[in-house]
Amino acid sequence: MSEDSELERLKAKRLAEMQKNISSLKKTKSAEAPEKKETQNPRDVVLSFLGFRGQEVLENAENQFPIETKSIIVQISQLIKTGELNEKLDGGQLLSLFRSIGLNVRMNTKINVEQDGKFVSLSEKISSSKNNDE
């Protein structure tokens, strides 16, 4: 049962991210968006340009490297404001950017595999297969 509830929680989280991305797209298309971007702080400007899992990567970077990340956010917001950066940054692209400049931002990863019609973590799958072998 806990796997089902975890799967439902992950689905709800993903749905919320997708809705947020759609709403941010609508905001950037509206006529008021350019006026707001000038008054927004750099972090808000960058957040409006982040795609799938971008916010998660940014938050991890801020927690692990607060000073460096603040400087990078300012630079990215300048690129966005000048129009040199005009496409969404997803989490993978942002993570690659941080790593290319020497900040090894660590992300929590979990590998799930299907077992008996359910998704279980790889560690659970390995431990259950060891128990079955014995």
Image (spheres, rainbow, N blue to C red):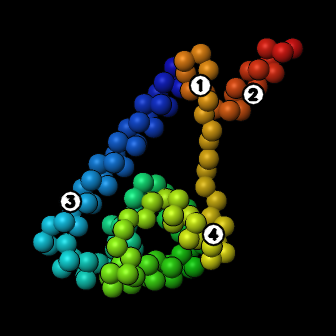
- Tell me whether the residue at label 2 lies in contact with that at label 4, contact meaning CB atoms closer than 8 angstroms: no
Q: CA distance from mark 2 to mark 3?
A: 45 Å
Q: Quadrant of the C terminus?
A: top right
- Residue with the mark numbered 2: 126
- Tell me whether the residue at label 3 lies in contact with that at label 1, contact meaning CB atoms closer than 8 angstroms: no
Neighbor class of circle 4 (other Cα within 10 Å; few <14, some 14-19, many 20+) is few
Q: Is residue 129 above or below residue 66?
A: above
Q: Amino acid at mark 2?
A: Ile
From the viewer's perspective, is 55 left or right of 31? right
Q: Residue at the location (54% across, 18% down)? A: 117
Q: Amino acid at mark 1?
A: Glu
Q: CA distance from mark 2 to mark 4?
A: 31 Å
Q: Residue at the location (63% across, 69% down)? A: 99
**Is label 2 in a helix, a strand or a loop?**
helix
Of marks 1 and 4, which one's residue comes earlier in the chain? Answer: 4
- Residue with the mark numbered 4: 99
Q: Residue at the location (39% across, 72% down)? A: 46
- Residue with the mark numbered 3: 26
Q: How many discs mark residues in the rendered view?
A: 4
Q: Position of residue 93 (x, y in %)?
A: 51, 64
Q: Amino acid at mark 3?
A: Lys
Neighbor class of circle 1 (other Cα within 10 Å; few <14, some 14-19, many 20+) is few
**Is label 1 in a helix, a strand or a loop?**
strand
Q: Position of residue 39 (x, y in %)?
A: 25, 82
Q: Residue at the location (40% across, 43% down)? A: 14
Of marks 2 and 4, which one's residue comes earlier in the chain? Answer: 4
